[in-house]
Image (cartoon, rainbow, N blue to C red):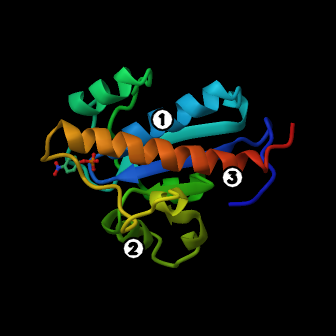
Amino acid sequence: MNRPITKDNPYRICFVCLGNICRSPTAEGVFQHLVNERGFQSYFYIDSAGTSAYHIGEPANSKSQFVANQQGVKLHSKARRFDMADLEDFDLILAMDHENFNNLNRLDSRGIHSDKIRLMRDFDPQPGDGAVPDPYYGGMDGFQNVFDVLKRSSENLLDELAKSINK
Ligand code: 4NP
């Protein structure tokens, strides 16, 4: 993940979960918010996708939006499925849990992109079991926890990447 990041060659990150309606849209929104706060908009291209086709075309889950909006973060995603071209297209592909991570690596059948497929919680100072827990079937507290985990991980990730920005 260490290459010079310039305005001519922005760093491309795709956050990936199962449905692309809860965790990865929140990650996309939080990371974009932090990038905007630091004035780094020209240095990053940020997107999200799901490994399943269950919710294609849908906006972020209403509970994800509620929790994010309370913190001033807007979620603009429209669910799409991660595909083979995305493996080529992004510098860093961040899986929300081990199942997503395994599915992404299966898609990369020749293993040529494995260096850029990582777990989001590799960047969490308190990584727990490495998974951002799926909040879909639970209550609001699960969505709040997802937001908190993703904020912490995103801050750390951006601190790391900011070292490679060449102004
Ligand atoms: P996400 O949450 O992967 O964080 O978007 C889920 C959304 C939908 C389903 C599961 C998890 N589902 O089974 O439909």
Question: Which residue is at a point 28% across and 25% down the rendered structure image?
Answer: 66
Residue assigned mark 1 = 30
Which badge, 2 or 1, is on the more N-terminal residue?
Answer: 1
Dot 3 alpha-carbon crowd within 10 angstroms: few under 14, some 14 to 19, many 20 or more: some
Question: Which residue is at a point 58% across and 58% down the rendered structure image?
Answer: 88
> Is ligand 1 less than 8 Å from the beta carbon at label 2?
no
Classify the position of the N terminus by image quarter: bottom right
In the image as oriented, which residue stretches furthest toward the front?
126
- The amino acid on which the numbered mark 3 sits, given as a three-letter code, is Glu
Q: Position of residue 149 (x, y in %)?
A: 41, 48
Q: Are marks 2 and 1 in contact (CB under 8 Å)?
A: no
Q: How many angstroms separate mark 1 from mark 3 (CA)?
A: 16 Å
Q: Position of residue 48 (x, y in %)?
A: 44, 43
- The amino acid on which the numbered mark 1 sits, given as a three-letter code, is Val
Residue assigned mark 3 = 160
Question: Which residue is at a point 57% across and 69% down the rendered structure image?
Answer: 113
Q: Which of labels 3 and 2 is toward the front?
A: 3
| SS at mark 2 in the image | helix
Q: Position of residue 4 (x, y in %)?
A: 81, 51
Give the left or right position of residue 15, taking residue 2 as reference: left
Name above or below for residue 90 compared with residue 43: below
Residue assigned mark 2 = 106
Q: How many angstroms separate mark 2 from mark 1 (CA)?
A: 28 Å
Q: Position of residue 60 (x, y in %)?
A: 29, 32
Picture quadrant where residue 71 is located: top left
Picture quadrant where residue 72 is located: top left
Give the left or right position of residue 50, taking residue 54 as reference: right
